[in-house]
Amino acid sequence: MLPGTPGLTLDRVAHVLVPGHGRNEDGSGLTPGGAGRCRTALALHASLPGVIVCAGYKSPADRKGAVVHTAGETFQGVPEADLMHAWLLSAGADPAVLRVERHSVDTVTNLLRAEHEGHFGDDRPVAVVSHRGHLRRILTVIAPRTLRRPYLGVVVPGGPPRENPLAAPISRLVAAALPADPAAAILSATRRSERLWQLAAVLGKRSYH
């Protein structure tokens, strides 16, 4: 476990949030890292009373996948959140505790949408499940600017201990001085992320990983 909100302990946590880790080569499945996050989330949730929120569509840099129709909407490839939902169901998760946030495009918007679109259903504390390097960025840079509930982190085994050095500065830019209105904050963060990834693509960078 990694600390987030001062004084929060795991026995006070209700919900689990699982940010996406990207999709496979054709946009139809999870990466091994994404499956690892689901595995840790499911094991953690066995002792918690709340829901598991699967968060993510795809990175703006991700151009993979055929056109897919899900929940009355059209996507390029299967959204990461739906892939995580399917993984959890196949592993025996109770469908009643699973929530899908399939529109966010990066970690900042993962948390913004999960929080402000009502996916948790209440204001009880949340455990964010991810790899160690990613969690450090979430807990120090992103969660203080996006979540309105107590939070901590639960580490997924494996993965690199540190992220690409560009990840944290980009998240700071995306999350800086967002509007107070939730819908406006989500729109602003999404546009910033898309523009920064457009710039990254011009410079030849297509992934944090």
Image (cartoon, helix red, strand yellow):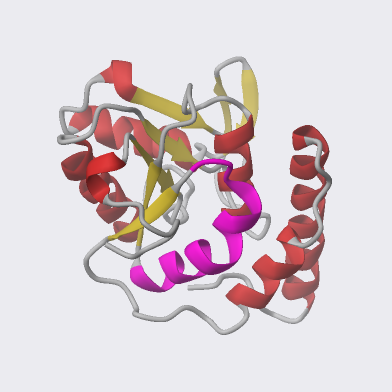
Residue appearing at x 30%, y 72% in the figure: 159
Residue appearing at x 48%, y 47% in the figure: 27
Residue 54, percent from left and from top: 43, 37
Locate residue 102 relative to residue 126 in the image: left or right: right
Residue 158, percent from left and from top: 24, 70
Residue 172, percent from left and from top: 69, 69
Examine the image and state in which quarter residue 195 appears. bottom right
Vertical arrangement, residue 188 with respect to residue 1, above or below: above
Examine the image and state in which quarter residue 43 appears. top left
The answer to whether residue 139 is magenta is yes
Picture quarter with the N terminus = bottom left
Locate residue 174 relative to residue 29 in the image: left or right: right
What is the chief secondary structure element of the magenta stretch? helix
Residue 203, percent from left and from top: 75, 81
Q: How many marks?
A: 0
Residue appearing at x 73%, y 72% in the figure: 201
Q: Which contiguous range is marked in magenta?
A: 132-149
Report whether residue 122 is seen: yes
Report whether residue 105 is seen: no
Locate residue 154 relative to residue 112 in the image: left or right: left
Residue appearing at x 25%, y 27% in the figure: 49
Looking at the picture, tell me which residue is in the foreground, 95 or 7: 7
Examine the image and state in which quarter residue 21 appears. bottom left
Locate residue 56 relative to residue 5 in the image: left or right: right
Vertical arrangement, residue 26 with respect to residue 88, above or below: below
Vertical arrangement, residue 195 with respect to residue 53, above or below: below
The answer to whether residue 16 is magenta is no
Vertical arrangement, residue 52 with respect to residue 129, above or below: above
Extreme-bottom residue of the structure: 165
